[in-house]
Image (cartoon, rainbow, N blue to C red):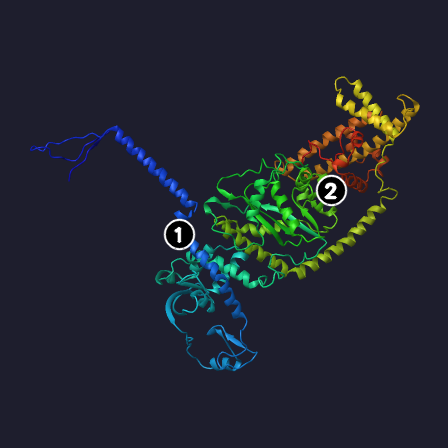
Amino acid sequence: MPITRTRTRTVVAPYQQIGRRGKLAKRKVSLHREHLCRENKKKSVEVMSEQMAVDQEYLPHHETKYTSEKKNRRQTWETLRADILNIARNQQIPQVLSCHVCQRDTANLFRCLDCAPWQDLCQDCLQERHKFPHLHHFESWRERYQKDMVVVDDKGRQHIRCMQFCKCELEPITLMKFHLWPASPKHPKVASHTDLLRWIYALSVECHVSVKGFCEALRARLPKQHQDFVSLEVKSIYKVLMKETLEEFRYFLYNISHLHQFHPQLSNGAECAACYKLPTKVISLDADFQLVRKVSSGNSWGKSKHTSFFLEQEVDEYMKSYSGDSKTPDGDCSVFQAGNSLRAKNKTAKLSETAVFGSACRHDFPQLFFGLKHGERLGYSVFLIEKLSEKTQVGTNLHIMYDIACVLHRHLQKSQHHSYLVNKIKLSVPIFHSYEHKQSCQILYSPRRTEGVGLSDGEGVERLWSYLGKFASITKEMTPENRVDLLSDALLHFGQNIQDKFAITLVRRYEKATQMELSSKAALQDLLSSQQGADFGRIEKPLSTEEEYCVTSETLDKLRSDNLRRNTKQEQRLENKLERLKAKKNLCNLTPGSERFMTRLSSAHKEKSKSLLTKLRHQCIEKVYLQELNRKYSRGQSIAIRLSRQIKASRSYIDKTIAIYNDLNHEQITYEQVMDLNNPGWHEFTSDCSPIKKVLEYENINDLEEDEITEDESDLRVGEELYAGIADEEDTC
């Protein structure tokens, strides 16, 4: 055989005989030809990559064999779904009240599930048939034919059986009469017993066992001799079950267990029975970032079978047009990552869905869910609130409990298109999450201070995530529609378990609420008896028009005398305010420096001093509370760092309030004096700054919206706005 030798950029051609002497001829291959070869290889690789990309998009004219087979199976299952369901329902109830053997009419019919589950027998025929051992016989069908099939029984053992079929009905329908579920919708060769599939379903929704794990357990339970010497017709039951077989069976169980298809008013398993016609419906929202889905799991093959819980397509279209997410949070608690569009980036490109956002009612029953393509943005919560309000009956109050209710409330107030939701819903923070917020947020959004919530803690969705999060290792490798169907089956199972326990849990909660009401009234009565003489309904006395005029004049004079901090806009605003006060009442005799002017100014200073002392004591109590709370955590923990920042901010607020108080009074106070809550100096105004009164004052002040606070009232605030009521730009949770 001729030998080809290769050198650098030179190829020796095969031996060639030239003329009589048979000389060897060498032929050099040009560099241009090598360059063309490399270019052709690159083009072929590009063409192949483009072809693969087209195949991945599942275009109709570039379908692979696997794609076409999968689509055909899905379409065939859809056509068989109604027939299989009708056969199963007809088997549960006798069609004719007569014996299949003696044809005698009777209401007492029996059915033997072992020998003839498709026959209804009277009692005499049943006893006669089972009196002696006998051989079972087949029913005589017209145009029948036989076929060998692999039958997997309820213990996972494989059997080869000769099955008889009739041409008048499809093979899956015939198998269903024998409680066998076909592995494929057309000409099945393998069938599994329905009890085996029910075991898979029960272990999946109750014990979070994957189908792969169940099939491996079936193999492991067999003796080693059986595994080594017994040949199996079906090598992998897992591959048989994964061809849309198990998904269809789960949906079949759902349809046969719920009767909403017969009448729309019947329950579909997705509605809480305890929330029916309640005056207030309490819903808690949250996201679970355990339930991710990988991009490598494939694209969608169609719509999901369950539509009761998940809102997939709607939320994607909504978020594309939603422009209300701000770059930074608007509320007090800006330390939370939830709701921040800058922190809510998709952290990895390998995930097509980063989490599941959902809701649960006050009875922990699942409500509505959808997958997140980004982080926990505020647009997702707004979308879910709109869907929940549409679902809520007319005349029912909707109360939303969310981890960052304070941030969401500010967001809705500033939104141009969703501000109407502020009047339709009430917001609060779940009871355990409220400890992450500062004290003002705890008072405003605590469920214990919101009417109509009762003892609902708002943590029902967290209990739901503890159950649903265990499906994360299973659903992350599934297609979108199969993932939604499995999670929907799990939610239906979770909700059914809750409804089954309503007779016990609702009675127990009622007894607990009754006992707590009695103990709370007794504790409140003891507290009120120790505060005798205090006027708990009185709020701080407002300044009169003359006192406002004197204080404004003094503030304007101080501003004009301070050349370093002079503000023209503020001077103009104070001058306009003086003109408005003069228009309300004739104040011509109230000139600066007069006796009447100084009397009114002194009275205003006393009221302001009392207000400052009340505010100062509240700030000191809050700082002590934060210090006690900080001692429970170790240094370096995130919550300890957060509390340290709050303590530092509290110190700065106390110093500012002390400085303002010292400017108004000759008697100077220090930080050490005010931080000593047992100081005898505090007893002079103990009745004015009791804890109960401060809560009442705080709630009344914060009932006002920001737009309702007039310019005159904002000018009367000394130094800064009330620490407990309005958000401050430096304040963090």
Total count of labels: 2
Q: Secondary structure at mark 1?
A: helix
Q: Which residue is mark 1?
A: 66
What residue is at 17 percent from the left and 37 percent from the top? 3
Dot 2 crowding, Cα within 10 Å, few <14, some 14–19, many 20+: many
Image spot of residue 64 (x, y percent): 38, 49
Image spot of residue 498 (x, y percent): 62, 58
Residue 174 position (above or below residue 390): below
Q: Which amino acid type corresponds to the residue marked 1 in the rendered image?
A: Tyr
Q: Which amino acid type corresponds to the residue marked 2 in the rendered image?
A: Ile
Pick the residue in front: 62 or 103.
Answer: 62
Kindly report which numbered mark, 2 or 1, lies closer to the viewer in this rendering.
Answer: 1
What residue is at 49 percent from the left and 57 percent from the top? 247
Image spot of residue 129 (x, y percent): 47, 80
First along the sequence among labels 2 and 1: 1
Residue 529 position (above or below residue 620): below
Disc 2/disc 1 C-alpha distance (Å): 60 Å
